[in-house]
Amino acid sequence: MGIRRKARELALKALYENEFNAEALSKITDRIQIEQRPEPDVMQFLQQLLTTYEQNRDHVNRTIEQHSSHWKLGRMASVDRNILRLGVTEIMYIAEVPKNVTINECLEIAKKYGTEDSSSFVNGILDKITKTTT
């Protein structure tokens, strides 16, 4: 598994935990670093993802809702919602990662952690967002 994939999976877990425990992402990240001891490159990309998301949380969430026909964030499965948050954060704010790579990575993570329908749901929304932000 590549460095960025590891970081994305850890970021998904951090966002999921943040959503249910309301613990600051920085504290969750610190705990991940202590407990899981990821490689420095993994930790760096993880922190970039989470910091960028946190700084742009409202815009990222609005963008997801605007592009998900008839789906409010609260109605989405938690795993799908948080994968979308990571994907939109990368697509909109992390230019060094090609958008098609971001989408493919999100789909693989959705297949691993989501439901049978997660990857198609995530793909549809990220595809719409990519087409309107380029």
Image (cartoon, rainbow, N blue to C red):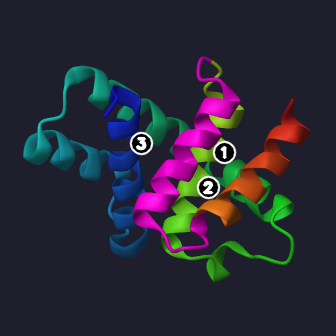
Which residue was labeled with disc 2?
84
Residue 40 or residue 120, whichever sits in front: 120
From the viewer's perspective, tell me whether residue 4 is left or right of residue 121. left
Position of the C terminus by quadrant: top right
Q: For mark 1, does the 10 Å Cα neighbourhood hold few (<14), some (14 to 19), or many (20 or more) residues?
A: many
**Residue at figure coordinates x 35%, y 55% from the top left:** 14
What amino acid does circle 2 point to?
A: Leu
Q: Position of residue 122 (x, y in %)?
A: 66, 59
Instruction: State the mark number for residue 88.
Output: 1
Do the residues under discs 1 and 2 have CB atoms within 8 angstroms? yes
Which residue was labeled with disc 3?
8
- Whether residue 112 appears in magenta in the rendering, the answer is yes
What amino acid does circle 1 point to?
A: Val
- Whether residue 88 appears in magenta in the rendering, the answer is no
Instruction: State the mark number for residue 25.
Output: none
Q: Which sits earlier in the primary sequence, circle 2 or circle 3? A: 3
Residue 27 or residue 126, whichever sits in front: 126
Q: Which sits earlier in the primary sequence, circle 1 or circle 3? A: 3
Residue 130 or residue 30, whichever sits in front: 130
From the viewer's perspective, tell me whether residue 98 is left or right of residue 134. left
Q: Position of residue 125 (x, y in %)?
A: 76, 57
Q: For mark 3, does the 10 Å Cα neighbourhood hold few (<14), some (14 to 19), or many (20 or more) residues?
A: many
Q: Main secondary structure of the magenta part?
A: helix
Q: Which residues are magenta?
A: 96-118
From the viewer's perspective, tell me whether residue 10 is left or right of residue 78. left
